[in-house]
Image (cartoon, helix red, strand yellow):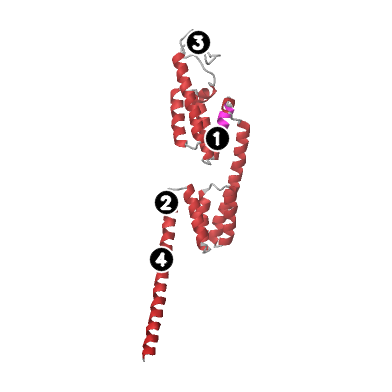
Amino acid sequence: MEEETGKINSNKHSCPVCSAVRDNPDAERCDNCGADLSTMRSLEDFTQTLLFEARNDIRQREFENARIKLEIASSLDEKAEITSRLIGAEIDFLNHQYQKAQAIYEEVYESGFNASPWGIDFESKIAELKNIIDIEFAAKEHFNLALHRSREGFFEEAREELYKASDMAPYIAETYLLAAKVDLSLGALSAVFDDLVRFRQLRPDDPRGISMQRELECRNHKSHILNNQITFAVCFIAFAIAVLIIIASIK
Ligand SMILES: [Zn+2]
């Protein structure tokens, strides 16, 4: 842990030969021992380019590409490690992993890292995250209340709580899954499909969403079959009556 903090604090560049701090990070030679720093400099430039590209990827929401670039940057240059983590926190932020992002921002902030070249204002970012996390906490309380109400059979009340939860934190998938179950109990079938669509947008691979969708499709299919049977029966009766009328009129 001590070593990691050390890395975080090594915000300044140093000479690999004599370890002297390089006051001018662009210099090709060490001011202290005269060592050739050109190879190191080009590696640093490359790392810096990777970090900038990663940040652009994040803006384009290409998180997978960004993660790879950040990983390569930190493996090439240990000074880039803390910057990579800081840039990577934005991915957590955009993925609604607010507590994870907050932990990184706070840790980097406390280490005294200078983030102004990256346009990051720690204090406002941390305050923004705190606010979001508080709202998320309140949304989860509404969700828990909805869960209790639905278990007690108070579906209307449960639905109200779920509306509040989804207004506050629309990115929480669980809200829509419970809403689908509650709407099903309320007999609001089109609402069930809406809930399910939102759940599956947020969690495309979640088996619960997939199985509920299949169950609904099956139910829909059965009601179609039933409708077809009723239509057939009505047509058959009408046909029979018509035949009887024709027979009667012939006599
Ligand atoms: Zn040196």
Question: Relative to the observer, which residue lies in front, 197 or 251?
Answer: 251
Quadrant assignment for the C terminus: bottom left
Q: Which residue is mark 2?
A: 207
Vertical order, 3 against 175 (above or below): above
Query: Dot 4: within a 10 Å radius of its alpha carbon, few (fewer than 14), some, or many (20 or more) residues?
Result: few
Using the image, tell me which numbered label, if any, was put on residue 70: none
Relative to residue 165, is residue 37 drawn left or right? left
Q: Which residue is mark 1?
A: 103
The magenta segment is 105-112
Question: Cα distance, mark 2 to mark 3?
Answer: 59 Å
Report x, y in % for residue 83. 52, 27
Q: Earlier in the sequence, mark 1 or mark 3?
A: 3
Q: Earlier in the sequence, mark 1 or mark 2?
A: 1
Q: Secondary structure at mark 1?
A: helix
Using the image, tell me which numbered label, if any, was put on residue 222: 4
Query: Dot 3: within a 10 Å radius of its alpha carbon, few (fewer than 14), some, or many (20 or more) residues?
Result: many
Residue at (56%, 52%) from the top-left corner?
143
